[in-house]
Amino acid sequence: PFIRFYAGAPLTIQGSPAVGTLCLIDREPRSFTDDDRRDLRAYADAVADLIELRVGSLEAEARGQALARQQELL
């Protein structure tokens, strides 16, 4: 409620549709320049990169745990 300004950039992960949106919201009306738009896109790309790194880390950890379980069974 009472939102007077909204700007958003999709968070896209390589090979998948958008997983979310990086949003700027305010109760005051604001202007949004082309420079602001480029900055928001750069921030959204950085967030998407961090998500990809985290997902990759979790996948590597899961593979390591699976390998450790297999070795325990041998």
Image (cartoon, grey):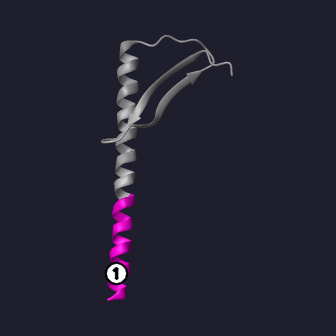
Total numbered badges shown on the rendered structure: 1
Per the image, is 18 magenta?
no
Where disc 1 sits, the SS reads helix
Up/down of 41 relative to 71, above or below: above
Q: Is residue 52 left or right of residue 19?
A: left
Range of the magenta residues? 58-74
Up/down of 31 relative to 24, above or below: above
Q: Can you tell which quarter of the image residue 3 is in? A: top right
Q: Could you tell me which quadrant the C terminus lies in?
A: bottom left
* Residue at image point 56% right, 23% down: 25
Q: Can you tell which quarter of the image residue 62 is in? A: bottom left
* Residue at image point 36% right, 37% down: 46
| Magenta span: chief secondary structure | helix
Residue 24 horizontal/vertical position (percent): 52, 25
Residue 41 horizontal/vertical position (percent): 37, 27
* Residue at image point 35% right, 34% down: 45
Q: Could you tell me which quadrant the N terminus lies in?
A: top right
Q: Can you tell which quarter of the image residue 42 is in? A: top left
* Residue at image point 53% right, 12% down: 30
27 or 12, nearer to the observer: 12
Q: What's the residue type where badge 1 is placed?
A: Gln
Q: Which residue is mark 1?
A: 70
Residue 69 horizontal/vertical position (percent): 38, 80
Up/down of 15 relative to 71, above or below: above
